[in-house]
Image (cartoon, grey):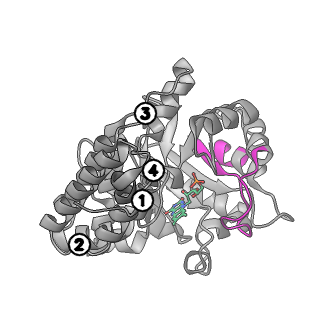
Amino acid sequence: MTLRIGNLQLATNLLLAPIAGYCDVSFRLVVRSCGGVGLGCTDLLCPEGVLRETKRSLELVATCPEDSPLCMQLYGSDTDRLCEAARWAEDRGAHVIDINMGCPVDKVTKRDGGSKLLCDPDRTLRLVEKVRAVLRHTPLTAKLRLGWDDTSIVAPQLARRLEEAGVAAVTIHGRTTAMKFTGTARLEGIAAVVAAVRSIPVIGNGDVRTPQDAQHMIATTGCAGVMIGRAALSTPWLFRDTWSYLTTGTVPPEPTIEQKCQLMRDHFYNIIRFRNELIALMEFRKRVSWYARKMTPCRILRDQMRTINSVADFERVIGEFLAWRAVWDLKPKRGVMREIVESEWRP
Ligand SMILES: Cc1cc2nc3c(=O)[nH]c(=O)nc-3n(C[C@H](O)[C@H](O)[C@H](O)COP(=O)(O)O)c2cc1C
């Protein structure tokens, strides 16, 4: 069940996906604290930005010893810049360096980066060979989609050639670029990549929302690991659950409402630690809706969190929500308490 990427042995075969704007160090630490994460990853990084060490790039690569092991993901198509940025990431302590070959966003593909790399495999191979050659000890990986569209499914052949070029693992998101995030991830597409490579691990990705989804992906495709993205935003303990399910067949009890609130607190104070209070407040006005998905009924939490202006407001909203949930948990059947609960009363 464990996974090795080049010289790096991971504790589990579950990887936290890069999600630009969401999976920064503050959030990665929350997910890691729940357990089960084999590898975390930065958001995609622009080589020019990291080489100039712009404020934004340094925020994106921010990490700390507990945020380990960590993959740093680069995007772009300029070979020289990518080589320099890969060396920069290696010097900054990246445990794995990944090249993004899956981003469908115009801003990235118009400059021939992201999933545009799928459109010219020969050129992509030359680029990867050069980046591989400049790295001294850090494994290089690639994160792909199936192809640009249904008429150009290149992932199996490309993955095989990437392996020959020295890539230590590939992650395959089972969608084409044209699909963006619509439809469902195609397990048969992931299986074709697994069948195409000789011995490197293939990590399957797309639409894994439960431990059972992860097991189904592994069983159906033969992939060596699973990468999970969006579902982690509302369920940071999904890696813990999935690892338990894969290794013991059982899923631990769901965290209590107090534990879920503590995860929100940890996340909030991490943002203050790595950024600042204002950003934590702005971020949580949005992020609360992800956490709230696993905290139903949650209108009070959502509505109140959207108005926070200070750390004291943040703590007050959590305190009030917990007090209200304590009443709700009594599940009064009728009478005034029932009316209170139905009106989502606030203490
Ligand atoms: C808002 C958003 C941002 C993303 N940013 C990145 C990124 O920076 N790098 C990357 O390789 N993939 C990125 N992805 C794709 C995810 O890593 C993942 O491949 C995709 O969401 C499918 O997995 P999931 O269904 O588990 O979320 C992003 C996805 C979303 C929705």
Look at the image and tell me in which quarter the N terminus lies: top right
Q: Amino acid at mark 3?
A: Gly
Tell me, yes or no, whether the highlighted magenta stretch contains residue 174.
yes
- Front: mark 4 or 3: 4
Q: CA distance from mark 1 to mark 2?
A: 24 Å
* Magenta residues (range): 160-187
Earlier along the polypeptide chain: callout 1 or callout 2? 2
Number of numbered labels in the structure image? 4
Earlier along the polypeptide chain: callout 2 or callout 4? 4
Q: Nearer the viewer, residue 207 or 37?
A: 207
Picture residue at 75% right of the left edge, 34% below the top: 220
On residue 294, the disc is 4
- Cβ–Cβ under 8 Å for marks 1 and 2: no
Earlier along the polypeptide chain: callout 2 or callout 3? 3
Which image quadrant is residue 48 in? bottom left
The answer to whether the residue bearing label 1 lies less than 8 angstroms from the nearest atom of ligand 1 is: no
Q: Which residue is mark 2?
A: 308
Q: CA distance from mark 2 to mark 4?
A: 21 Å
Q: Which residue is mark 1?
A: 342
Q: Amino acid at mark 2?
A: Ile
Q: Is residue 278 left or right of residue 173?
A: left
- Cβ–Cβ under 8 Å for marks 2 and 4: no
Q: Is residue 160 left or right of residue 320?
A: right
Question: In the figure, 109 relative to 214: above or below?
Answer: below
- Front: mark 3 or 1: 1
- Where residue 126 sits in the image (x, y, percent)? 63, 59
Q: Which residue is mark 3?
A: 36
Q: Is residue 1 visible?
A: no
